Each structure stands twice: as C-alpha cells, then as structure tokens.
Amino acid sequence: MSIEEMLDTDLQRMAPARVFDNFYMLGMKTVTAWALVTAEGIILFDAMLHHNVEETVIESLKRLDLDPASIKYVIVSHAHNDHFGGAQYLQEKYGARIVMSIDDWEHMKSWPQLGSPAPLPQEDIAVRDGDSITVGDTTVDFVVTPGHTPGTLSSVFPVRDGESVHYIGYWGGAAVSFLPPEKITEYMASAERFARSGDRIDVPLSNHPYIDGSLQKLARLKDRGVNDPHPFVEGNSDFVEWMATIHGCAGEVLAQKLKDSEAD
C-alpha cells in the first residue's frame, strides 16, 4: 500500500465504535485514534491527520454521543504527522492540552512529513519516562520507548468492561524499515522494556490496526454474546508475546539491513 492510499480518508473510511465501556476507536482503517472517557473529560490518544481531523475525530465523537469540547488532553504517541496532524486544530478550537515526550517535541520540528504538511501545535506538556497524567478517576502512565522516533511515547491505562477492569498497553510506534541499524536496535530494546511494564496489562493496542489486529477484533466484538470473552482482552502472557513478535520482526529487518550493508 502506498503512502497516498494509507492517508486517503475516502479509501480508508471507518465507522467509530465503542470498544470498552469508556474507550472508543476513531480514525481510519490504516491509522487510529482512541478516546478514553473519564469522570472529568476525554483523554484522546493521537490526533489523526490535519486534513481529516474534523471527520475522523470530531464528527466521530459526535456520532458516539461524545462532546469534543470535553477533550482535556491529546496524548501524541510520536512526532509523525499521521498522529500529531490534528493536534493544532484540537488545541486551538477546544483548548485541549497537547502531551508529547520532550524529545519528540523537538523531533516534530525537523521530521519530513508525509503527504500534506500539518501545522505544528504550540508546544505544551512535555513528559518524561515514568510520568503520568490523571483526569478524574483515570490515570495514564507513560513509558518512553525510543526507536521509531527519538521520544516515542507508549502508555498504560485502565478501561472498563462491565464490572471488570482491564489495562491497555498502548505501543506508541510501529515500523522500522526506514530506520538505520542503530535505531532499530534501540527500538528492539524499547520493545523488551515495554513488555515488562507490568503483569496487569492484558490488552495489546497500537495506533495502526495492522499491528494489533483491532479491525478483526472489532468485527468479533460486534457478534459478542453475553457470556463471551472480550476479543480485545488477550491476557498478559499474550501481550508479552505480542511485544516479542514486534521485537522479532524488527530483528529480521535489522539482520537484512546488516547483510545488505556487508554486501555493499
């Protein structure tokens, strides 16, 4: 799939959906944003692209009977414009606070953007590894996982399914093929570290559906019976295995890059 196809709103259009009692899937079939509803407002994970944020985020929230004006924070996982593109719009229109790692606030200024360049949000909240943000009854813990970008931000936070509470491990950056070998090595170390973020994590998730299978899980969720398990809840061992797969795939890319460099 080309970059143009990946970013084409019409081609990749997707209906928004409630995945957990307080957690909603927005965006497109190729790139997603997620809305976490708390007692005192919405925490939005990623901001989509600047040319479609009104449809993929604002209109999607309204379709779900959620108020975009209640967005308190936009947590940008990393400084690529398919994730921060709509941040300035949300910041200016709704006063949402924009959260990014220290390194990625800087990286955003120099990274060559994909497709139509997005306006940069005004620099706001810069977080470090181990920081957290609390809104109402919900706390999001941050793990800085460099590699995909210098300050990729991964998150751990609770969601509700009836009387059950589950914890999402939100992997902030996928894909390594564009990286030099030393950055792939850094990415692999970050994957190992995030896998050790705690045995409470039982929901693997990312901002690209092809990484976590969220579209397939969403289809199963629609057919879920009263006593059926939640298709997004995989258990901690499966979360760790998922991160090991991400690590292993990166290792294969690294091995090929090193082989190619030796051949040159």
Image (cartoon, grey):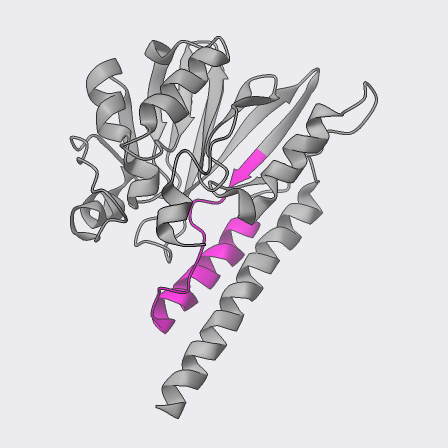
Residue 93 is at least partly visible in this image: yes
Q: In the picture provided, is 44 more to the left or to the right than 238? A: left
Q: Nearer the viewer, residue 159 or 89?
A: 89
Q: Residue at x 61, y 17 (%)?
A: 21
Q: In the picture provided, is 109 more to the left or to the right than 216? A: left
**Residue 25, relative to residue 226: is it above or below?**
below
Q: Residue at x 45, y 54 (%)?
A: 1
- Queried whether the magenta region covers residue 256, the answer comes back as no
Q: Write down the region rendered in magenta.
A: 168-196
Q: Nearer the viewer, residue 81 or 133?
A: 81
Return the x and y of residue 182 as percentages of the image width and height: 35, 71
Q: Residue furthest front?
A: 10
- Queried whether the magenta region covers residue 186, the answer comes back as yes
**Residue 22, relative to residue 260: is it above or below?**
above
Return the x and y of residue 118 as percentages of the image width and height: 21, 38
Residue 196 is at least partly visible in this image: no
Q: Residue at x 45, y 85 (%)?
A: 259
Return the x and y of residue 57 as percentages of the image width and height: 39, 23
Q: Residue at x 16, y 52 (%)?
A: 110
Give the quadrant of residue 124.
top left
Return the x and y of residue 145 as percentages of the image width and height: 41, 51
